[in-house]
Image: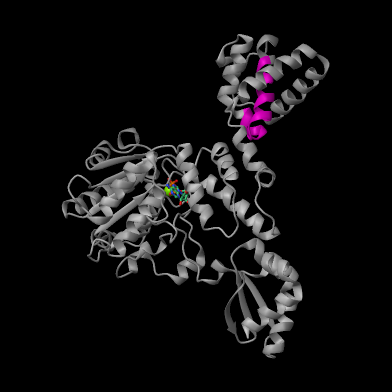
Amino acid sequence: AWARIRGRLREDVGEVEYRSWLRQMTLSAIEGEEVVILLPTRFLRDWVRTHYSDRLRVLWQAEHPGVRRIDIRVATEARPAEPRGEEPAQPRAGGLAESLSPRQPEPVRPEPARAAEPRAAERPTNDWSAKLDPRFTFDSFVVGKPNEFAHACARRVAEKPASPGFNPLFLYGGVGLGKTHLMHAVAWAIQNGEGGVERHVTYMSAETFMYRFINALRNQSTMQFKESLRSVDVLMIDDLQFLIGKDNTQEEFFHTFNALVDAGKQIVVSADKSPSDLSGLEDRLRTRLGCGMVADIHATTYELRISILQAKAQTAEVEVPSRVLEFLAHKITSNVRELEGALNRLIAHANLFGRPVTLESAQEVLHDILRAHDRRVTIEEIQRKVAEHYNIRLTDMSSARRARNVARPRQVAMYLAKQLTSRSLPEIGRRFGNRDHTTVMHAVSRVAELMQADVSFAEDVELLRRMLET
Ligand code: ADP
Ligand code: MG
């Protein structure tokens, strides 16, 4: 019946409309009077809900007179809620992790998750690895100069966990450069028995580790917590920097770590810095973390960005011209996640409107992203340049001095900060010696006024802007 309904709908609305909005519908369930239909994104769900639910209902009723409602959902909503891999951030120093003081907020987990899933401590075994991302495999990881060493180490660990020299494996690098992807790839490979043996892998973020630990303390089930962790063959902890300042959790992790390594089990850890640069972690832990293999994922090169884009574009249904890929690789250099996001948006747009991807459409569709990347100027840079230009001290940017020769440059810097960064007025105020946002607002309009009135002042400010933008 579903196939017939789709066919009728397709005839009804025409090929273009069908392809734009309805092609990705899937039938999830018929539950009594209700038919559940899934769409991959919220955007599509809302669109189909508003524009097609009546028609869908009528078509369904023609097939099954009992149907009364059509429930249109996003594909993930339909599954029983799962706790997110990473829990919401908590206050840092002295946060609840450490004090367990009743005034601190509880670690929040979405309620349905709690109902659907027994608490960690009550589980006979841990199957936390269920949260691995199916897209993050070795197959989909593009190797290039900046990541080839980390990749080789990850491969090695996946093939032969706990081999000497590779335990622990410590992966580090900046945001969005593939640490989590590589870790999941290792976990998948080991789980799929690529080494020929079945092994028990546990992957979680350091944040999750902390919440499990705290829950165990609360429920007085630390023994189970310890046992469940000590029974794994491979323990992977992502974003270890989260444990900075969480001394109790760090200590617990240190003991887990030692117990596992002593028992010949593999540990894989990721962080945003190398062990020696993770100040704030206990020395003995840093030392042990650096004992195995430490692998750095470097910032991407243009070549790697192109390869990644090509790989992703290949799987798309629309053709993305290489000029567009080159354009993206030039413009979006900071992290792979944003690069991917930009490409996905282009593809989605082309799919929705049935138009080809071109350089022009890319510039239009990615307007906001590209602008953000054009303007990678920091407030510090602005302050430095402006202070230099007017020959005042950098500290006067945040000092309380009100003399005109200091106050005016400060206003110029605030004006430029507003123009060239995406910071809000209160944020800018804070960076200029904790000034109020109204002070910044005043500075911005005052400088604009002066630029109107005084051509040479305007030229000055424009010159500064150009220097900062290039
Ligand atoms: P990190 O954990 O370092 O912040 P992620 O592993 O989450 O970064 O990567 C961010 C996104 O970029 C993910 O979607 C990931 O698949 C993708 N990515 C990063 N590096 C690569 C790569 N070398 N090949 C393919 N995809 C990559
Ligand atoms: Mg990550």
Q: Is residue 16 above or below residue 401?
A: below
**Residue 107 seen in this snapshot:** yes
Is residue 421 a member of the stretch shown in magenta? yes
| Magenta span main SS | helix
Q: In the image, what residue occupies the spot 47% across and 47% down?
A: 308
Q: State left or right for residue 323 relative to residue 50.
A: left
**Image quadrant where residue 148 sits:** top left
- Percent position (x, y) of residue 141? 41, 51
- Percent position (x, y) of residue 270? 35, 46
Task: Kindly give the residue lying farthest to the bottom in the view shown.
Answer: 65
**Residue 96 seen in this snapshot:** no
Q: In the image, what residue occupies the spot 50% across and 43% down?
A: 306
Closer to the camera, 405 or 90?
Answer: 405
Q: In the image, what residue occupies the spot 59% across and 28% down?
A: 377
Q: Is residue 393 above or below residue 325?
A: above
**Image quadrant where residue 144 sits:** top left
- Percent position (x, y) of residue 222? 29, 59
On-image quarter of the C terminus:
top right
- Percent position (x, y) of residue 388? 59, 12
- Read off the magenta span: 409-429
Is residue 23 a member of the stretch shown in magenta? no
**Image quadrant where residue 55 sits:** bottom right
Q: In the image, what residue occupies the spot 39% across and 46% down?
A: 143
Closer to the camera, 117 or 136?
Answer: 136
Snapshot colouring:
one colour
